[in-house]
Amino acid sequence: MRQALGADRVAVTTVVAAAFAHDPAWAFLLADDYDRLAPLFAGALFDLRVRSGHVWVGGADRATVAMWDPPGATEDSTAEASQMWAVYRHMAGAAAWQRLTEYERAIESVRPSTPHWYLGVLATHPDRQGQGLASTVMDTVLQRADTDGIDCCLETSTVKNKAFYERRGFTEATEVRIASCPPTWWLRRAPQGS
């Protein structure tokens, strides 16, 4: 496991697009244009985080990735982030952008105002799932959050993923209501240990 570099972009976007191919939230966000939009969307998420050093890849083949926002991150408000999202908005079109805006608005309504690590993406290539890679790639930030006494948060739209995260300490769940989107939960993991 290591921090991702800009040169990892293609490998990461490929893994993320493959991993989320059957995810209900990504199906809502990208609709019938998944094959075209998934790499663009994954690329935007990667670009927003890689320079700050909060993207981690695991496996010799970079088959798993965790993209985090640190406590107090304001990356989405920077001019560079605005420009990246403008490019995505142009490529995705008005309908996809509207769905993303609706989704983000709903997520923001349940996001805590207290400092927390936010796991924006955790993905493992389908061929490598079930090998413990995702847990390993999360560990660095989870351990840091525990040491610093800071919560970790994320959202998921599948019962299977919700159970996966619960086994890793994300036990507080808040339902997120998004029109036309499948059930989604905001999950919180309090710092572990003493």
Image (cartoon, rainbow, N blue to C red):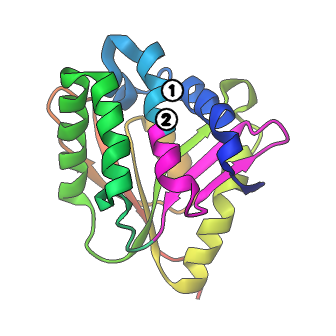
Task: State whether residue 159 is above or below residue 20.
Answer: below
Q: Three-letter amino acid code at disc 1?
A: Pro
* Relative image position of residue 17 (x, y in whole percent): 54, 26
Residue 167 in view, yes or no: no
- Quadrant of the image containing the N terminus: bottom right
Callouts 2 and 1 close, C-beta under 8 Å: yes
Q: Farthest residue toward the bottom?
A: 194
Q: Residue at x 20, y 39 (%)?
A: 101
Instruction: Write down the quadrant of residue 103 in the picture.
Output: top left
Q: Farthest residue toward the right?
A: 60
Q: Which residue is drawn at 67% across and 30% down?
A: 125
Looking at this view, is 141 or 97 the one in front?
97
- In space, the residues marked 2 and 1 are separated at their CA atoms by 5 Å
Q: Is mark 1 on a helix, strand or loop?
A: helix
Looking at this view, is 166 or 115 the one in front?
115
Q: Residue at x 34, y 22 (%)?
A: 30
* Left or right: 99 as drawn, with respect to 66: left
Task: State whether residue 140 is above or below residue 48.
Answer: below
- Can you identify the residue that label 1 sits on? 39
Q: Give the range drawn in magenta.
A: 44-70
Count of picture labels: 2
- Can you identify the residue that label 2 sits on? 42
